[in-house]
Structures are given as C-alpha cells and as structure tokens.
Image (cartoon, helix red, strand yellow):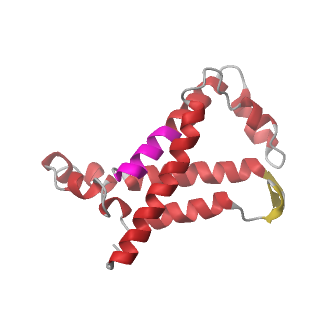
Amino acid sequence: MPNTTTERGLIFLLRVTVGWIFLYAASHQVFAADFSIVGFLNSTKTFHGFFQIFTGPVVAPIVSFLVAYGHLLIGLSLISGLMVRVSAAFGIFIMLIYWMAHMDFPYIGDTNSFIIDFHIIDALVLGLLIATRAGHVWGLDAWAARQPLVAGNKPLAWSVA
C-alpha cells in the first residue's frame, strides 16, 4: 500500500481515470438499444477465427450484454474503490482480449503501435491497482474489509484486500 500522500494521490488518480474509461465505454453500450459486438469482432485480423465464435446469432447477444454491463460494473467498482481486486482482474482480461482483437500482427490498431499499445498499458495499470490495494486509497474497500460479513468470509475478504 502506498505510504506517501503523493503515492496515494497518484494511485487514486490512476484508479479513478481507468474507472472513467470503463464507465464512459459503458455509457455508449448500456444505453444504446442496438449495441452489438458483432461489427467489432468481424473486423479482427490476426485472431479472426477465434473471435468469429462470438459473432453467432445465439452467442453475440450474450457477449454484447456481458461486455456492456462488464464495462459498467468495472467502471463503478474502480471509481468507488469497492472490490477493486476483482474488477481490475476482469479489466485486465478485457484489455488483453481487446489487444488481441485490434492486432494485425505485429501492429496493434495502426502502424504506430508495434506489439504494445494502450490496452497493454491499461492492463499494467490495472495490475498496479491490484498490487497496491488501490481500493483502500480513498475508496470503499477499507470500509468493506472491516464489515463482519466480509471479515468472516475468505472469498469476500480477498476481494477487498
């Protein structure tokens, strides 16, 4: 856990700004009546065969729902500082999937990003948030960890550790 006010301030700002990225993405997905991941996944190049599995008429609505509400929950969790360890882990997973989906090996998205792009940076920041117990820095994880229901339950205690 960060010790100085500067470290705590930077961890807090990283947590809230990455949370905002997820929350803003959710605002375009959750409230859009026609949001679907099919268009995005149909344009993949390097792992096109893998991503085509998720574009079928049965699977696509489920995955679209999970993406939209996953963004919403991750964003709310990071901004509030509640269950940051869990939401950051899911955020890392999503960032790595997006990184793969944007890949036209060895470029990611365009010729300005060679193997590494902002998805990898975001995943690393989320890993830092887990390692530094960022939910305890002006967030609700510290409060939640003191609650009797959480303190007596190992999985819940882990999620706010």
Image vertical order of residue 130 relative to residue 152, above or below: below
Identified at 28% across, 53% down, the residue is: 140
Q: Tell me: 150 left or right of 9.
A: left
- Residue 21 location, x and y as percent? 55, 49
Q: Tell me: 4 left or right of 103.
A: left
Question: For residue 111, what is the image quadrant?
Answer: bottom right
Q: Is residue 90 magenta?
A: no
Image vertical order of residue 145 relative to residue 2, above or below: above
Task: Count the labels in the image.
Answer: 0
Outermost residue to the bottom? 4
In the picture, the quarter occupied by the C terminus is bottom left
Identified at 44% across, 59% down, the residue is: 15
Outermost residue to the left? 148
Q: Principal SS element in the magenta part? A: helix
Question: For residue 37, what is the image quadrant?
Answer: top right
- Residue 91 location, x and y as percent? 53, 51
Q: Is residue 75 magenta?
A: yes
Q: Nearer the viewer, residue 53 or 18?
A: 18
The segment highlighted magenta reads: 71-81
In the picture, the quarter occupied by the N terminus is bottom left
Question: For residue 136, what is the image quadrant?
Answer: bottom left
- Residue 39 location, x and y as percent? 76, 31
- Residue 156 location, x and y as percent? 28, 49
Q: Tell me: 147 left or right of 119.
A: left
Identified at 74% across, 39% down, the residue is: 51
Q: Nearer the viewer, residue 48 or 69?
A: 69
Identified at 51% across, 43% down, the residue is: 23
